[in-house]
Image (cartoon, rainbow, N blue to C red):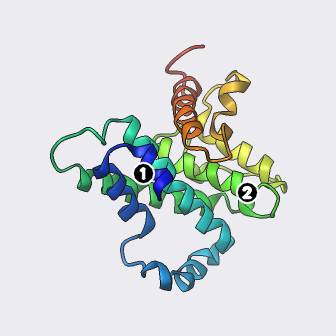
Amino acid sequence: RFVVAAVVGGAAAFEAVQGACSYKRGVAPRSQRAETVLEESADGVPAQFLLSSRRWLGLCMATSLDEEGFGEAVGDVRSLARERCLAADERLQELLRHGAVATRGEAGGERRALVFARLAAWFNETVRPLEAWRTEEEDPERALESLVAHLCEKYPDVPAPLRDAPWFGADGDASASRVAFRFCRAYALVGAGAASV
């Protein structure tokens, strides 16, 4: 909690992230959440992967809200921040359902969970619909690469450093999260054809 608080910088944004990303509407308190998680993972997403993704989503939303100035905003920003966090949690659920193949396997699981969280938190708009993505890939890492390219790249000429943006600093360091956020913003613009490199 202290790491996330340090990232956010603004108490209002931190409280909104803590409240909204930790709990979905109607989800039991943390001590009772294990049963809910098992039910939510019935579509093939391992329960531990779901928990990891949601934990990373908190850091990603804290970074996003801070970078967008929610920490310094005046007025009632909590409700807006909470809505954004709930929307990101819903996007995460959809991403995990459609990209379940990329959630399997132990190797690199935390890293992939972070990428799913970043997609949900930082890529509100995509160049293609999630429902249109299909893959024959069995390797979870390659399946996730395919999903990211499908959602973020309208044109195939995106430079490799930007293509790797969702994976940048995957150790979860707070300062790396800020840099990754900025790289992901650039990747989204270049991938959509809205900016050139």
Task: Give the structural element (helix, strand or loop) at label 1.
Answer: helix
Residue hosting label 2? 102
Checking the image for residue 5, the label placed there is: 1
Left or right placement of residue 65 versus residue 121 in this view: left
Q: Residue at x 44, y 66 (%)?
A: 22
Left or right placement of residue 12 versus residue 195 in this view: left
Residue type (three-letter) at the residue carrying disc 1: Ala
Question: What quarter of the picture does the C terminus occupy?
Answer: top right
Q: Farthest residue toward the left?
A: 75
Upstream in the sequence, badge 1 or badge 2? 1
Q: Is residue 41 above or below residue 165?
A: below
- Residue 145 drawn at (x, y percent): 73, 43
- Residue 37 drawn at (x, y percent): 56, 77
Q: Residue at x 81, y 64 (%)?
A: 105
Residue type (three-letter) at the residue carrying disc 2: Ala
Residue 146 occupies quadrant: top right
